[in-house]
Amino acid sequence: MDYWNAPMPDMRPVLTLVPGEKIGAEFLVALNKSRIGFEVTADNFQKMLNAERDENSRNLRRFRSFFDYQSTYHSYDEIIAELQRVSTNNSKVVYNSMGKSYEGRQIPFLTITNTDVKEPKKTVVFECGIHAREWVSTATCLWMANTLITDSINEELLKKFEFIVIPSLNPDGYVYSHTVNRMWRKTRSPQRGGQRGADPNRNFDSHFGQAGTQLDPSGEAYPGPKPFSEVETKALANLVLSKRGQIAAYFAIHSFSQLWMYPYGYTSVPPPNYAQLERLSTRAVDAIRATSGLVFNKGTIARTIYKASGSSIDWAYDSAGCKVVFALELRDKGQYGFILPPSQIRSAATETWAGIKAVLGEL
């Protein structure tokens, strides 16, 4: 069974991917016996995967002469080539790598700012693609980087902030989700029992291995054998710590469920600056609703979605000195889930950017 989301306080349905007709039939019998209400939202998941793949392939052919930021999920190699291209052609942009993944891939990031402004600037971090199957996270990061670079309306932001954009923190998992298993979530490092991967968003040194984790290495929320066992999370930690005291805001971008959240994940106790984070979250979700009409719920991670220890957000807040930190779950609420059609990339990115700009306007 692959549970796509957990039970939430607002009684939102739990989405479950059930493998095979036989297991599916047995699962429905068990639900009926337990008098648990359910609805079959898709009776052929492979058809959803095929539809996403076919639409993406059409867009790749249609826009083959340039990098399409608005309606295509790109491969890792395509992303690297584009990041290198834009950094070569624009003085605002620097391409870099925070290190290599377990399988030896570069973990890329862009630094974007107005280099004519010599005064020290605060940094804004966009962390995307930590979970491999959340393709719209990576696509949204790329779209936001592009709008920062190309849209003159954002010039004042570039004078005020330095943006660090990390589109694919988990490149091995991202490649695996494109080539082998679309639903892959974790890293690809070897684990005990012949299993592969740890959940990188449970691998940070913040109440490691506590709420919201699994001891079984085959589990989707297996945190790894120890904090920062994954080279990808260690590389991110080193980058963030190198900016300690300079980070104005940190955004960890995930999908799906339409949520705008802040610390903590490991406990229901709110953080000391709860009032500030709640106020900024209200600004953000209001801006999203004004942009697209979509409603995003807001609150602490533990109270809004579920308890989760070892997350990048809690670690950034407690250990890296980042006090304006948010975890976003992008659209939708479950119609497509992780398989959001490529045609919705632009809308997802546009509303996300509206929420982020609303926060930055208050800083």
Image: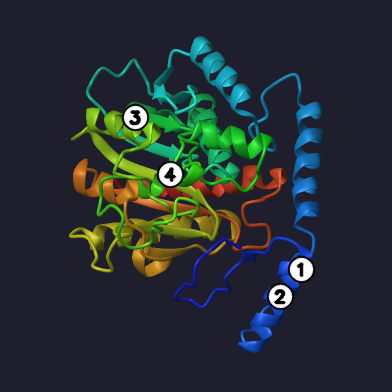
Q: Distance between the residues labelled 3 and 2?
A: 44 Å
Of the residues under marks 3 and 2, which one precedes in the sequence?
2
Q: Distance between the residues labelled 3 and 1?
A: 43 Å
Callout 1 environment at 10 Å: few (<14), some (14 to 19), or many (20+)? few
Q: Tell me where residue 256 appears, x and y as whole percent.
A: 55, 56
Relative side of 63 to 6, left or right: right
Please give the residue where the numbered disc 3 appears in the rendered image: 235
For label 2, the SS is: helix
Do the numbered discs 1 and 2 sit on residues whose CB atoms are within 8 Å?
A: yes
Q: Tell me where residue 276 appears, x and y as whole percent.
A: 25, 58
For label 1, the SS is: helix
Relative to 221, residue 123 above or below = above
Residue extending furthest toward the top? 88
Q: Of 242 and 102, which appears nearest the observer? A: 102
Of the residues under marks 3 and 1, which one precedes in the sequence?
1
Of the residues under marks 2 and 4, which one precedes in the sequence?
2
Which label was assigned to residue 22?
1
Please give the residue where the numbered disc 4 appears in the rendered image: 192
Which label was assigned to residue 26?
2
Q: Tell me where residue 188 appears, x and y as whole percent.
A: 50, 36
Relative side of 49 to 86, left or right: right
